[in-house]
Image (tube, grey):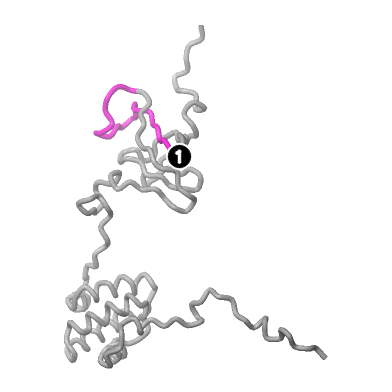
Amino acid sequence: MHQPPAAPHTLALGESRSINSDQTVRFGSVRYSTPPGLVGQEAWVRVDGDELVVVVVAQLPHRPEWLQGPAGLLEVARHRIALPGRPVIDPAHYPDHPQRADGSPRPPKAKPSTAAEEAFLALGPGAASWLMEAAAAGTTRMRVKMAAAVELAALVGAGEVDLCLGLAAAAGRFADDLLSIARHRATGARPSDLVFCDEKYSVQPGTSAWADFGRKTT
């Protein structure tokens, strides 16, 4: 009889993948998470019903603490198959990442690095929301607008400015000054009126092609 190979035939395990630096393997244009300590290792992935199974060889050069026991094949992750562009991430695979008690990811928290940023964030949660949303939107001259918000708070109160900042963040109005929002609120209008639904953000095609419909050509 022939001597069995040192490594199993990959056809029995699925497709070979390398575990990326973000602890994920890629299959069908989707990233699936794996436990810590396996970055750079070879893994095999296969479809089992509507799940993706990730298997590694337990005998690794540097085995993580949780990967103990005899050498051999070990299933390390099992995920539901997802559509392309929708990564499947198990929070339990990232124990060192900030998480809530239920294991869900904890949202980022703004941390001031200057006295001006500290004064701005001291206005309240609306200021923190504005800062993160404005940064994500690529807003320009943010420091100038933050300083103006602190100055306005000395006139109308920190609570009112913080509320205006929260409304601006929710409406995506980072180009407008807070004074206009404060004046709008002073009229007793609804906060929802701050969001303008105009043609600029509409996905409805224009009707210019219908302009000559029914007209007689000469």
Residue plotted at (48% across, 50% down): 83
Q: Is residue 81 above or below residue 148?
A: above
Q: Is residue 4 left or right of residue 132?
A: right
Residue plotted at (38% across, 38% down): 78
Crowding around mark 1 (Cα neighbors within 10 Å: few <14, some 14 to 19, many 20+) is: few
Q: Horizontal and vertical percent for residue 138?
A: 39, 73
Q: Horizontal and vertical percent for residue 71?
A: 33, 23
Q: How many marks on residues?
A: 1
Query: Which secondary structure lies at badge 1?
Result: loop
Quarter of the picture holding the C terminus: bottom right
Q: Horizontal and vertical percent for residue 165?
A: 27, 80
Q: Horizontal and vertical percent for residue 99?
A: 24, 53
Where residue 18 sits, quadrant-wise, is top left
The residue identified by callout 1 is: 50
Residue sitting at the far right: 218
Q: Is residue 207 left or right of residue 152?
A: right
Q: Main secondary structure of the magenta part?
A: loop
Residue plotted at (37% across, 77% down): 172
What's the amino acid at mark 1?
Answer: Asp
Residue sitting at the far top: 1
Residue 124 is covered by the magenta coloring: no
Where residue 38 sits, quadrant-wise, is top left
Judging depth in this view, the residue of 112 and 123 nearest the camera is: 123
Q: Is residue 21 above or below residue 218?
A: above
The segment highlighted magenta reads: 50-71
Residue plotted at (30% across, 48% down): 91
